[in-house]
Amino acid sequence: MSSDSRPLHVFLVVGEESGDQLGARLMEALIRRTGGSVRFSGLGGSRMQALGLAPLFPLHDIAVMGIGPVLARLPTLVRRVYATVTAALAADPDVMVIIDSPDFTHQVAKRVRKERGAIPIVGYVSPSVWAWRPGRARKMAVYVDHLLAILPFEPEIHARLGGPTTTYVGHPLIDRPDLLLGTDGERQPLATADPPTLLVLPGSRHSEVSRLLEVFGETVGRLAAKGVRFECVIPAVPHLQETITAGSASWAVRPTIVSGEAAKFAAFRRAHAALAASGTVTLELALAGVPMVVAYRLDALFRIVKRIVLATGQPQVSSMVLPNIILGRNVIPEHLDADVTADGLAAAVAPLLADTAERARQVEALGDLWTRMALPGGRSPGDAAADVVLATARRVPGR
């Protein structure tokens, strides 16, 4: 940034609601760090708008996931990419920050870098190069000056793969221990729970629920048939609540279905075990101290694409479960594709609802997660991210 008194200008590019949350916390930290001498432009959601960002267009225009939905919206996505690039070049900011949603945000960054290489670019949230397409790391180094990682193992993987300079700035979940852990005594000890609570989490997208809800229901039935006693709770995202309610109506143990973030985390704080789809929810459960079994089924098209892509580079980790990767050992059982069967899942879940060695191993291991994910000095993820953004903006000569 130049030595004049003008505010720091940060151009932000977000592609979906999860990025809007990260972007808002980053904006709040930048406002604190600069004493308010900062202005924002670009693309964001309602939280970022509340902090002064006037978005280029509605976020729902580009918030699509999965190969099918992306292809269906491709013309709109392409137009929005170029509109965002044009706005970034016209703004000529001190720094541009792209946040998550790599199918959109990285397309913007590549084109801005090609047209005006002097604009420093910070990436916030690494694509999962550790799971597949590891070659993306080296390609990213061409157009991202600094990458902000939310998982502690990612800096080492990017260094190994030739990716951009990467700093772990903390996962947003570590900012919310009260939400995940609650007060002492909120979770009844397993020995006195009558009955214990099993969470069932079939996913937050319709495609996940369509592939997992039925087999999860069969698993609940197998457990009940074995004489395992438990209360079943399904935290459902609001737009899938009706689908999940209908799909679970005939389960052997009728689930209690809760909706919304507050109800979800309240259920986490009282749960004794979980059966969950792979994803961020496994990290939420782990930080809440809930032992779990994880399952995932890929859709047919994605399975074909992933098989082709994996032929060019092997995964950098030995698990699909985030807590396992962070802990460096596979303490949480995981079932993928053909291994997702009711018999197999029930056999893995049952020991977690009793006082067993399997349960004790998970509980002990999950207790290490908070330490492994903490930032030095108790800093918040927003402040850590803001410090890197400021350093990246200021180190460019003549700006």
Image: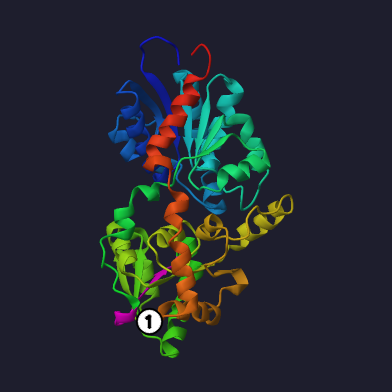
Total numbered labels: 1
Type of the residue with mark 1: Ser
Picture layout, residue 280 above or below residue 209: above
Q: Is residue 195 magenta?
A: yes
Q: Nearer the viewer, residue 41 or 319?
A: 319
Could you tell me which residue is drawn at 68 percent across and 43 percent down?
A: 135
Q: Residue furthest top?
A: 4
Q: Secondary structure at mark 1?
A: loop
Could you tell me which residue is drawn at 54 percent across and 43 percent down?
A: 126
> Which residues fall within the magenta stretch?
191-202
Q: Nearer the viewer, residue 230 or 245?
A: 230
Q: Is residue 254 magenta?
A: no
Look at the image and tell me whether residue 278 can be seen. Answer: yes
Look at the image and tell me whether residue 204 can be seen. Answer: no
Scheme of colours in the image: rainbow
Could you tell me which residue is drawn at 48 percent across and 45 percent down?
A: 150
Image location (x, y in percent) of residue 43? 41, 33
Image location (x, y in percent) of residue 108? 53, 32
Q: Residues within 10 Å of mark 1 (few under 14, many from 20)?
A: few
Image location (x, y in percent) of residue 172? 40, 46
Picture layout, residue 248 above or below residue 310: below
Q: Split into 4 quadrants, where in the image is the N terminus? A: top left
Could you tell me which residue is drawn at 67 percent across and 59 percent down?
A: 304
Q: Nearer the viewer, residue 130 or 104?
A: 130
Picture layout, residue 324 above or below residue 385: below
Q: Which residue is mark 1?
A: 250
Image location (x, y in percent) of residue 8? 39, 20
Q: Residue furthest front?
A: 377
In the rendered structure, the answer to whether residue 279 lies left or right of residue 248 reads right
